[in-house]
Image (spheres, rainbow, N blue to C red):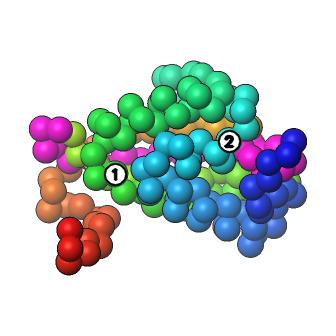
């Protein structure tokens, strides 16, 4: 293993919180290439009812996800941790191409390799239709945009 993604296991409360924040920050870029680099080449995933493995499949999945889930904004929270595992709860908001808004709630279980890359991700997610006025998470837009 030549790649390293600090913090690495074994996790402490501080390093587990840093790992969760790093994941939140990366996913909020909506950049499949960047996000995929946090996972081992053979990472095992379950996302809702989809099961797949490997960085190439992760990239494909994320491209599809963010093509559908527009203006995606995510918040993750540490739930628990052990030496090489972290559990998080999360919620994110997005809209579809018809303009309907959703808040998605879920839980993830993560298992990490010694180099700090995630080798396993299990995600359970439920979607709740919301009105745009009910949104909690909003992007800060620059004046030039």
Mark closest to the chain's N terminus, 1 or 2: 2
Task: Determine whether 90 is above or below 54 in the image.
Answer: below
Residue that mark 2 sits on = 39
Q: Position of residue 32 (x, y in %)?
A: 49, 42
Residue 72's disc number: 1
Q: For mark 1, does the 10 Å Cα neighbourhood hold few (<14), some (14 to 19), or many (20 or more) residues?
A: many
Q: Quadrant location of residue 144? A: bottom left
Q: CA distance from mark 1 to mark 2?
A: 21 Å
Residue depicted at x 29% and y 36%: 68
Q: Which residues are magenta?
A: 97-118
Task: Say whether residue 4 is magenta.
Answer: no
Residue 33's disc number: none
Q: Position of residue 15 (x, y in %)?
A: 75, 67
SS type, badge 2 = strand
Task: Determine whether 19 is above or below 141 in the image.
Answer: above
SS type, badge 1 = strand
Dots 1, 2 in contact, CB < 8 A? no
Q: Quadrant location of residue 96? A: top left
Residue at the farthest front position: 144
Q: Position of residue 14 (x, y in %)?
A: 74, 72
Residue 45 seen by the camera: no
Taking depth in this image into account, of 24 and 81 the one nearest to the observer is 24
Residue depicted at x 53% and y 43%: 33
């Amino acid at each position: 293993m030549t790649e390293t993604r600090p913090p690495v296991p074994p996790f402490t409360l501080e390093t587990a919180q840093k790992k969760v924040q790093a994941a939140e920050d990366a996913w909020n870029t909506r950049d499949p290439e960047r996000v995929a680099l946090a996972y081992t080449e053979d990472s095992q995933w379950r996302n809702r009812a989809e099961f797949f493995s490997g960085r190439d499949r992760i990239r494909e999945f994320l491209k599809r996800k963010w093509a559908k889930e527009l203006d995606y904004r995510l918040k993750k929270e540490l739930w628990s941790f052990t030496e090489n595992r972290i559990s998080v709860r999360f919620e994110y908001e997005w809209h579809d191409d018809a303009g309907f808004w959703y808040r998605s709630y879920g839980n993830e279980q993560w298992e990490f390799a010694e180099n700090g890359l995630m080798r396993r991700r299990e995600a359970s997610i439920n979607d709740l239709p919301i009105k745009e006025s009910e949104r909690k998470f909003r992007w800060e837009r620059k004046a030039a945009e």
